[in-house]
Image (cartoon, rainbow, N blue to C red):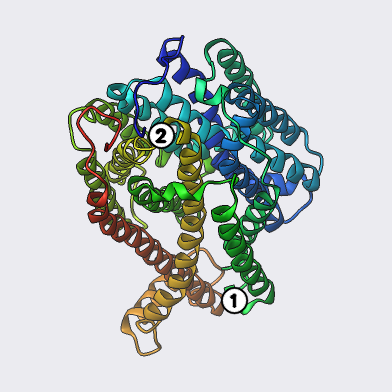
Amino acid sequence: MPGDGGASKPKTNPWLIAVSVMIATFMEVMDTSIASVAVPYIAGSTASTTDEAEWVLTVYLVANAVFLPASNYFSQRFGRKKFLMFSIGVFTIASFLCGIAPSLAFILIARAIQGAGGGALQPLSQAILLESFPPEKQGQALGLYALGVVLAPVIGPAFGGYLTDAISWRWAFYINIPIGILAILLQSKFLDDPPEIKNAKPGAFDGIGFGLLGLWIGCLQFILDKGQEDDWFGDARIRWAAGILVVSFTLFMVREFRHRKPLVDLRAFSNRNLAIGCALVFALGAVLYGLTTVLPVFYQTLLGYSATRSGLAVSPRGLGSVVSSIAVGVLLSKLDARWVVAGGFAVLGFSGFWLGNLTLDISPDTLFWPITMSGFGLAMIFVPLSKVALGTVGKEETGNASGIFNFLRNVGGSIGISAANTIAQRHLQAHRNDLVHWYTGASWLLRRQLRLLTASLSLHAAGPGSHNDTLRAISLTNSALNSQAQVYAYVDVLRYFGILCFLCVPFAFLLTKPKPGSEGAG
């Protein structure tokens, strides 16, 4: 029965179980962003270009996404505890291999293995938390889970930047080794499979479905990574990838709906709360990873911050997430979760418009409150949305539903990052064209600007008013114009994310109203 609370209780204190699974989840989610600041250093160490080194991020995301929805089958086939510990072991060993990688090819293979190992950690951890806590405590458990999946991508760039600047980029991977060992030790002591996992009969592995899933996810990630760089469908490779994506995705959907024992049971979408919850978490993933990408880039490229300093500048989001996770976890047992989700999207949308006030003259503290507010809104959404979307499925379907839920959040994140980069680049060109209209030869403002700059530069040159001083003044003016156009483009990105959040508010009320103190809607 959906939402049945009569399943056997765990033998261990649920909070010890929560800590043991969340250590690994936090490590895995943080690894999706911790390596991003190390890409230029990886390129230098492996004698490759920055574009080539960015495949270190892409390969991980593809392997992670492919194994994420497949985790339910493997946990039923081998046992959830064994498979979770095995996955952490693979992730930890692969982290070591990434750290010692002598070449780009070596690290790409290691990152693919790391992504495959990490794909199971999020859905299995979420399923274990939901099954380990009684209905009235699930809000608090999901609050702890939210700390991992919301806080980790925020901490990742700052922590990775610090390790890269202070020691070496290789320590962005070595740091996973002691954490992985600790997680395995704790799980071996505290975890135990529930009866529905011990007695599960998953059937034969759906290899065709798995292959189709990997194919269309790989094509999607290639399009998202290379689209803006290669002018999207103006490039033949993008068109071929899009064609393969459409065909493989269609075949995958047909296969999974018609197969008796599919790799991913898409019939779970017949549950209204799960379907709407997946759509909302898709949008949440786009906003979360989009914001995580835009703000550090703004600080580094336009304000000249280091990787560590830019990471610290966006760290207040973590403070907001911590406070919100604690508060929401307690309030969920008393409030209608739909209002909390709607309020979270409204808060996140308002923070997007507030962040849209950024300029080139801001200090590191200027955006403290809007960044904190964005973290508060993220946790306000994720905790109750997870509870309502997953709390209405049966215990035996929790693993499958959690895999789909987390998979769509990650796909939303990839699309959000690509959308943010595309809007930033396209709107940069548009805003530059608009600003250039004010910088014509007839503009007194331009003539005054050039005259003042030329006079200032001539003080440090051989003679006043030289031709070189004028050329330097024009160059500085052009750089300032480009920087201002880029700021306007980032403002557009932040406001678009804000609009997306506001559009999600009414959809929260399409969720089935959960009963107070219950798992979800009956």
211 or 243, nearer to the observer: 211
367 or 81, nearer to the observer: 81
Q: Which residue is mark 1?
A: 233
Tell me the quarter of the picture where residue 520 sits: top left
96 or 398, nearer to the observer: 398
Q: Is residue 353 left or right of residue 203?
A: left
Q: Is residue 284 left or right of residue 498?
A: right
Figure quadrant of the C terminus? top left
How would you rate the neighbour count of disc 2 (Cα within 10 Å): few for under 14, some for 14-19, many for 20 or more? Answer: some
Q: Is residue 175 visible?
A: no
User: Which secondary structure lies at badge 2?
Assistant: loop
The residue mark sitting in front, 2 or 1, is: 2
Could you tell me residue 198's position as x and y percent? 57, 22
- Residue shown at the point (24%, 25%) measured from the top left: 330
Figure quadrant of the N terminus? top left
Query: Is 1 located above or below residue 448 in the figure?
Result: above
Q: Which residue is mark 2?
A: 394
Q: Amino acid at mark 2?
A: Gly
Q: Is residue 339 visible?
A: yes
